[in-house]
Image (cartoon, helix red, strand yellow):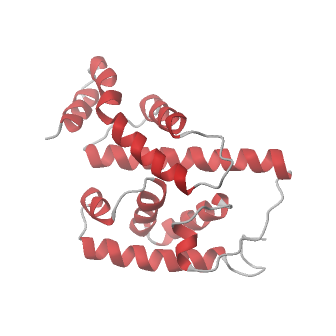
Amino acid sequence: MTDVTKILDAIERGDARAVDELLPAVYDELRLLAAQKMLQEPPGQTLQATALVHEAYIRLIEGADQNWKSRGHFFKAAAEAMRRILIENARRKKRLKRAGNHQRVSLDDVNLAIEGPSDNIEALDEALVKLGKENAVMAKVIELRYFAGLTLEQISEILNISRRTVSSYWAYARAWLYREMTKSDDGFCD
């Protein structure tokens, strides 16, 4: 059992001191994940990796669900929190700059939909929500890879599925998201 798992167990038991021990124990890893994600954001991003980590941590600690079963479960929750923060930030910027007008997303290859900077993170989020309704595990693979910057091996460990399955899900979900994000008039990329 790792130190983080022990701290999470103490938090679940109601030990208030454990909450104070959690941030120092996970900060470097969360900061690295946030920094990797921020490198994928378009230039001019005003949100810094440190601010992303702090906002995600506050949401996790103040949130209703603090029943993290393991280190991996905690980092899944952190990835979800970071995803929501980045999406909210993108929506806020879009409302302020473009009065909420949607713009068509042009992607030249499948990798750009997932690994490159995304000018339309809202479209990615909408597609990811739709994928989650069809296959929640595939959606979680994309979320952990894209928003948290985890490797396929790390995702395999966190989700407790084989590396080969994660790789298959990653390939399929990237293609599926690309198709969804590049749909013609009936899609959400107006």
Compared to residue 61, the image places residue 149 above or below, namely below
| Residue ranking furthest to the top | 17
Q: Quadrant of residue 67?
A: top left
Compared to residue 181, the image places residue 57 above or below, namely above
- Of residue 118 and residue 63, the one placed in the foreground of this image is 118
Location of the N terminus by quadrant is top left
Residue at position x 49%, y 34% in the image: 59
- Of residue 7 and residue 152, the one placed in the foreground of this image is 152
Residue at position x 35%, y 79% in the image: 168
Place of residue 64 in the rendered image (x, y in percent of width and height, measured from the top left): 44, 34
| Residue ranking furthest to the left | 1
Location of the C terminus by quadrant is bottom right
* Left or right: 113 in relation to 163: right
Place of residue 40 in the rendered image (x, y in percent of width and height, measured from the top left): 55, 57
Q: How many marks?
A: 0
Compared to residue 158, the image places residue 10 above or below, namely above
Place of residue 188 in the rendered image (x, y in percent of width and height, measured from the top left): 72, 70
* Left or right: 43 in relation to 74: right
Residue at position x 24%, y 36% in the image: 4
Q: Quadrant of residue 61?
A: top left
Place of residue 13 in the rendered image (x, y in percent of width and height, measured from the top left): 24, 27
Compared to residue 165, the image places residue 31 above or below, namely above
Residue at position x 32%, y 61% in the image: 155
* Left or right: 99 in relation to 65: right
